[in-house]
Image (tube, rainbow, N blue to C red):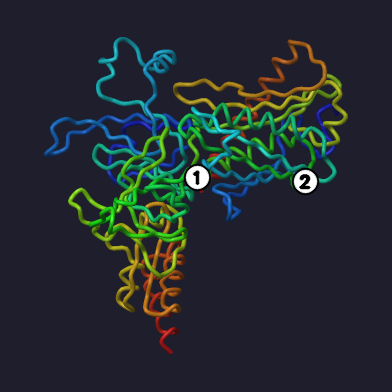
């Protein structure tokens, strides 16, 4: 078994493979502009209860003697990453477990009462209130049908409750959220959806240079794309799917080649 | 020589292990695992919705479906129950109340030690699906033939060993936890003293299997 010590995760660009059950020891670092150096623990890690540490003889004496070093347990396999005081495990997963604040693409599965039931890829359906849209009133509100797609933000996520969605910001503006009309929905891995959302994503820049299209990327691994013609939409879909296993340079070449074929 | 086995292995030698990850498209996680000619495929779905009748308010419902190879239809219920027990013990089922984690196990070829194969494949498939586990687990089996311990028996050896066949699923050790058995299945009579040595053999074998699973996943 590998124990990843503080030294190994001390630098920002670290990438150590960890498996469930591994123990990770991390000490918070002073960050400029932040008052207290507190660790922020991301997905894939849990804090080991103090009682368990004591029983194992890792923690001796009083709790303060261990300083601020946290003993964490890995629960999913992946690469351990650290940025400042944030630690998390980066794994490749297909099943989405949306978190509060995530932007997701949902499919309307029912319209009971004042709510819409929305499938967002989690273990149960989310609810979306029919007034949670920009400028919606009781008289004037969007009428969604079963099978419609919505781009929404997860407003409430609690393990004992159904997740709640909203298509409107606190400011009252939709800012792109709401019904997605036409287009094509497809699913990708969660890792790829993160890549697409990151700045300077090669495939999106390459596609943007070739043709105009609309795209919406949900953190639940769903992507909606729409271009002027169906074959152009499929080009976008195929290019994104292929980009998962290609380098930035190869992606650019592939997109150019695909665009050239579609024009001829 | 008492040491030699039909396939030329030493008494405490495992058959070569092989595994494949994420080989199915539809499930959230899948894996195959084989010990020599014994081969099993596991698929994991979940956490997903669960019928109201099987819903548990504070934890995920773990369901294991076991599909036997055509020539081996015995013991499927017992083996699926044991696999279910292992998943219940080590997956973070309390993180996903009112949901289901479904494991589907398909025997591909039976040459002994199917339960151990299935538990190892399940561990890989759960990791592939990204379901939180408190620790990695692995399993191995051991038989006693004419008073001699042999690790990872083939089907012929397993049938010959009327004394005892033990399959143990072992939670792997970490800095704060010692290795411990989470499930154990044995058949046939065995003296307590002998059982201790059998368990030690199985435990060290599972450590070797777990190391293999770990390298497989990290690739």
| Residue A146 % position (x, y) | 46, 58
Q: Which residue is mark 1?
A: B218
- Chain letter behind tag 2: B
Q: Where does the N terminus of chain B fall, quadrant-wise?
A: top right
Task: Say above or below: B169 vs A103.
Answer: above
- Chain letter behind tag 1: B
Q: Which mark is residue B179?
A: none
Which residue is at the far front?
Answer: A139
| Residue A123 % position (x, y) | 49, 43
* Whole-number angstrom distance, CA of label 1 to CA of label 2: 26 Å
Q: Nearer the viewer, residue A160 or A68?
A: A160
Closer to the N terminus: mark 1 or mark 2? Answer: 2
- Helix, strand or loop status at disc 1: helix
Which residue sits at x=17%, y=37%? A31
| Residue A216 % position (x, y) | 34, 62
Q: Which residue is mark 2?
A: B109
- Helix, strand or loop status at disc 2: strand
Q: Nearer the viewer, residue A186 or B12?
A: A186
For the residues carrying marks 1 and 2, which lies nearer the camera in this image? 2
Which image quarter: residue B37?
Answer: top right
| Residue A92 % position (x, y) | 46, 49
Which image quarter: residue B209?
Answer: top right
Q: Nearer the viewer, residue A13 or A196?
A: A196
Q: Are marks 1 and 2 in contact (CB under 8 Å)?
A: no
In the image: residue B102, left or right of residue A74? right
**Number of other residues with Cα within 10 Å of mark 2, as a class: few under 14, some 14 to 19, many 20 or more:** some
Tell if the residue under mark 1 belongs to the same chain as the one under mark 2: yes
């Amino acid at each position: 078994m590998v124990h990843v010590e503080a030294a190994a995760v001390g630098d920002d660009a670290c990438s150590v493979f960890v498996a469930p059950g591994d123990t990770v020891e991390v000490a918070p670092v002073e960050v400029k502009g932040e008052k207290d150096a507190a660790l922020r623990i991301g997905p894939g890690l849990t804090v080991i209860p103090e009682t368990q540490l004591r029983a194992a003889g890792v923690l001796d004496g009083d709790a303060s003697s261990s300083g601020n070093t946290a003993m964490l347990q890995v629960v999913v396999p992946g690469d351990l990453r650290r940025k400042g005081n944030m630690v998390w495990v980066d794994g490749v997963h297909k099943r989405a477990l949306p978190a509060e604040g995530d932007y997701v693409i949902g499919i309307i599965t029912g319209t009971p009462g004042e709510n819409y039931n929305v499938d967002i890829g989690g273990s149960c359906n989310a609810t979306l209130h029919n007034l949670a849209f920009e400028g919606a009133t009781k008289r004037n509100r969007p009428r969604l049908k079963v099978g419609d797609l919505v781009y929404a933000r997860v407003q409430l996520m609690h393990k004992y409750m159904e997740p709640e969605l909203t298509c409107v910001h606190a400011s009252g503006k939709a800012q792109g959220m709401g019904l997605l009309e036409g287009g094509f929905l497809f699913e990708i891995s969660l890792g790829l959806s993160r890549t697409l959302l990151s700045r300077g994503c090669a495939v999106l820049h390459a596609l943007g240079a070739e043709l105009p299209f609309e795209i919406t990327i949900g953190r639940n691994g769903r992507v909606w794309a729409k271009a002027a013609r169906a074959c152009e939409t499929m080009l976008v879909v195929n290019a994104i799917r292929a980009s998962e296993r290609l380098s930035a340079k190869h992606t650019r070449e592939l997109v150019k080649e695909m665009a050239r074929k579609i024009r001829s | 020589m008492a040491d030699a086995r039909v396939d030329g292995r030493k008494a405490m030698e495992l058959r070569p292990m092989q595994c494949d990850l994420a080989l199915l498209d539809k499930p959230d996680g899948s894996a195959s695992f084989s010990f020599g000619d014994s081969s099993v495929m596991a698929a994991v779905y979940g956490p997903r919705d669960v019928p109201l009748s099987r819903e548990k308010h504070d934890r995920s419902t773990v369901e294991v479906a076991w599909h036997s190879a055509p020539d081996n239809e015995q013991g499927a219920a017992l083996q699926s129950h044991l696999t279910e027990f292992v998943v219940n013990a080590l997956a973070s089922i309390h993180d996903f109340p009112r949901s289901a984690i479904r494991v589907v196990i398909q025997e591909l070829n039976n040459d002994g030690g199917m339960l151990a194969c299935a538990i190892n494949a399940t561990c890989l498939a759960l990791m592939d699906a990204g379901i939180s586990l408190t620790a990695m687990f692995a399993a191995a089996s051991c038989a006693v033939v004419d008073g001699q311990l042999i690790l990872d028996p083939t089907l012929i050896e397993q049938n010959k060993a009327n004394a005892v066949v033990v399959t143990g699923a072992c939670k792997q050790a970490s800095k704060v936890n010692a290795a411990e058995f989470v499930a154990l299945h044995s058949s046939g009579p065995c003296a307590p003293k002998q059982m201790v040595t059998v368990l030690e053999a199985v435990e060290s074998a599972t450590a070797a299997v777990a190391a293999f699973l770990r390298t497989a996943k990290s690739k």
